[in-house]
């Protein structure tokens, strides 16, 4: 039961941008701060850009910015959008070979559990997890300079 | 967001035993029915036995049996017991290197979501997913002979 690294990194990018909202950020800087692969992060940023979570500005003074206020980035929506593998068990995926699938009632039970998981995330926004109570500490850790 | 194959297979073993309760089963037979690795299944059965979900009887007339009635095998308890990786994100695990962990509020949010996921499973037993409404169909698929 684990989110993909892709989703994990997408959260880290958005938290970085929420905390460093006063200046555009670069992929290199974010990769360096979190000590994660720049190549992997490029794909994450591309996807976040495609899905409208951030804007990549070119040229001098360019860089990455959130496209909306952190309070308008819902975590449930983000996870649904970024998590490529929501297949809790084999029977949720395209390559299912489990013989009992037509008669098994596990799938609706796991669907209900997954919906409950996402319903909790639906009640939180990026503003709740990033610059909230611990905002000052996050700024110290992630400050650009 | 996916359960390990280990947990998936443990559910399949218990469903098999719930459906074929009239006679002891063998690992070979279960592996053959589901077309999954016998070696992998041996480890799953060993763990289920260690954790008190099934009994392995030796000798003539021996084999695998559920140790309790399906209605007494709670799915939430089973998943908590069998799922070795409940680390939704890196910060839940022992090998966490995420720099913002001390200041980040994602972990309690994901804990709350995971608890909601498990709370749904806590309301179901093996009897709800195995020989329930679709019991006859499961018997047809998994019948030993």
Image (tube, coloured by chain):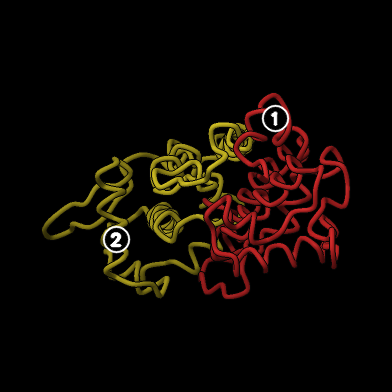
Chain colours: A red, B yellow
Image quadrant assignment for residue B19 = bottom left
Residue A117 position within the rendered picture, expressed as x and y whole percent measured from the top left: 66, 42
A108 vs A41: above or below: above
B59 vs B83: above or below: below
Residue B112 position within the rendered picture, expressed as x and y whole percent measured from the top left: 62, 32
Quadrant that contains the N terminus of chain B: bottom right
One can see residue B21 in this view: yes
Q: Residue drawn at (50%, 39%), measured in percent from left and top? A: B76
Residue found at the far left of this picture = B59
- Marked residue chain, label 2: B
Say which residue label 1 marks.
A135
Q: What element carries label 2?
A: loop
Residue B122 position within the rendered picture, expressed as x and y whole percent measured from the top left: 54, 35
Q: Residue drawn at (49%, 69%), measured in percent from left and top? A: B141
Label number found at residue B59:
none
Camera-side residue: A53 or B77? A53
Camera-side residue: A120 or A7? A7
Say which residue label 2 marks.
B25
Image quadrant assignment for residue A138 = top right
One can see residue A102 in this view: no
Q: How far apart are marks 2 and 1 (CA)?
A: 57 Å
Instruction: Decide: few, some or many residues near mark 1? Use Cα within 10 Å; few <14, some 14-19, many ≥20.
Output: some
Side of A38 relative to B78 (left or right): right
Instruction: Decide: few, some or many residues near mark 2? Use Cα within 10 Å; few <14, some 14-19, many ≥20.
Output: many
Q: Is mark 1 on a helix, strand or loop?
A: helix
Residue A5 position within the rendered picture, expressed as x and y whole percent measured from the top left: 57, 58
Q: Are marks 2 and 1 on the same chain?
A: no
B111 vs B44: above or below: above
């Amino acid at each position: 039961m684990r989110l993909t690294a892709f989703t994990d990194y997408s959260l880290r990018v958005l938290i970085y941008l929420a905390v460093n909202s006063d200046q555009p950020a670069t992929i290199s800087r974010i990769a360096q701060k979190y000590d994660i692969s720049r190549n992997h992060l490029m794909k994450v940023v591309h996807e976040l850009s495609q899905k409208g979570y951030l804007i990549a500005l070119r040229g001098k003074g360019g860089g990455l910015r959130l496209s909306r206020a952190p309070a308008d980035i819902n975590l449930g929506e983000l996870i649904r959008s970024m998590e490529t593998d929501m297949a809790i068990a084999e029977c949720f995926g395209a390559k299912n070979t489990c013989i009992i699938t037509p008669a098994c009632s596990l799938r609706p039970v796991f669907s209900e559990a997954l919906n409950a998981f996402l319903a909790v995330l639906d009640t939180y926004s990026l503003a709740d997890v990033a610059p909230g109570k611990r905002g000052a500490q996050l700024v110290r850790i992630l400050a650009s300079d």
